[in-house]
Amino acid sequence: MIVAALQFNPAFLDVHANLITLEEYLRGIEADLVVLPELCTTGYFFHDTAQLRSVAVHRDAEGLALFRDMAREHGMIVVAGFAERDGDRLYNSAATAFPDGRLEVYRKVHLFAEEKLHFTPGDGGFSVLRWGDRLRLGVMICYDWRFPEAARTLALRGAQVIAHPSNLVVAPKYWKPVMRARSFENKVFTISANRNGTEERRGDRLVFHGCSQIVAPNGTALEEVDEYFEGWLQTEISPANADEKAFSQWNDIMADRRPDTYQL
Ligand code: ACM
C-alpha cells in the first residue's frame, strides 16, 4: 500500500485558493492513503470566532466535495483537516473520505492554546476506521501527540496506521521523536502531515515547522522532509506488519500490558 503525506503552506482564509492548490496536489499523486495537514483549507491563526465561523463548513457541505471526489476518482483514502461547523459549534476536525463515498469525521479531542477560544473539544473519542480487509486506520490531530493515551487507544482498538494531520508550532526536535515513540510503543505506522509557512495577527507570528514524517512500527522514519520542503512524501508499507506486537518469543507489547496496575 502506498501512503503519502502532503506538506504545504495554506493561504490564510483563502479557501478557494487552497482548494485549487489541494486539487492540483491530489491529481498529482498515486497512492492508497493520503494525509493532508490540519485545517488545510482555511489556515490556522484566526483573529476571532466569527472569522473562523465564516470559513467553517458542515461535514456534508461542498467544502468537503474535493476530498470525496478525489477519493472516488483515484480509489484512495483522503484524510484532510478542516474547520467543521455543526449548528453553533465549531470543531477542529479531520475528514476521512473513502473510495466508496463513505466520509468519517474525527473531532480533535485535545485543543491547543487559543483553539480553546474558538473550537469545541471533540466529543467522538478515538475510532478506528476500516477499509475492508486492507486497512484499519486511526486519526488524531496535531496536539493529540502529547497524549500517549490517544495513540494507545487507537492501537488497542486495532489501528495499524495512525494519520496525524498537523499544524505544529513546537520545534520538531520535540514532536518528531515523540511520534517515533508513539509508533514504537504501539507498533503502528504513524503519518504526520505538518504544514509549513507563517501566519501573523496583530504583531503575533506563528511559525509552522513542516518536517513531516512517516514512521514504521519499529520507530524508524521511512520518509522525512525538512521545514522548507513543499509537496508529497510517500512510501510503501504493509499495514499487516503493525499486527505483529511480539518482539521476541517472550514478549508481546500488548499481551504484556498490566492494566490492573495502571492509573489512566
Ligand atoms: C496544534 O495542535 N495545532 C499545535
Image (tube, helix red, strand yellow):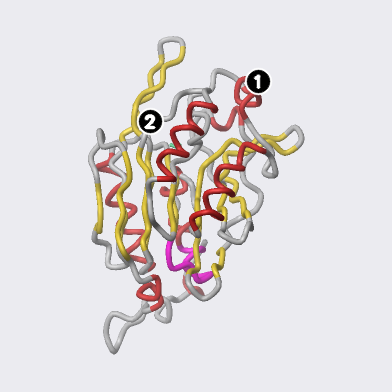
Magenta stretch encompasses residue 42: no
Please identify the quarter of the rendering in which residue 251 is found: bottom left
Q: Nearer the viewer, residue 72 or 58?
A: 72
Whichever of callouts 2 and 1 sits on the residue coming sooner in the sequence is 2
* Residue drawn at 57 percent across, 48 percent down: 69
Please give left or right for residue 238 compared with residue 62 in the image: left
The answer to whether residue 191 is visible is no
* Residue drawn at 53 percent across, 44 percent down: 110
* Mark 1 crowdedness (10 Å alpha carbons): few <14, some 14-19, many ≥20: few
Location of residue 261 in the rendering, given as x and y in whole percent from the top left corner: 47, 72
Residue at the top extreme of this rendering: 202
State the count of labels: 2
Under circle 1, the secondary element is helix
Task: Relative to 203, say whether 100 is above or below.
Answer: below
Task: Relative to 63, say whether 117 is above or below.
Answer: above
Please identify the quarter of the rendering in which residue 200 is found: top left
Q: Quadrant of ligand 1?
A: top left
Quadrant in which the N terminus appears: bottom left
Q: Nearer the viewer, residue 157 or 225?
A: 225
Q: Magenta span covers which residues?
A: 152-161
Q: Which residue is mark 1?
A: 50
Q: How far is mark 2 from mark 1, CA to CA? A: 23 Å
Q: Nearer the viewer, residue 193 or 28?
A: 28
**Disc 2, ligand 1: is the CB inside 8 Å?**
no
Q: Amino acid at mark 1?
A: Ala
Q: Which residue is mark 2?
A: 9
Location of residue 227 in the rendering, given as x and y in whole percent from the top left corner: 26, 35
* Residue 12 badge: none
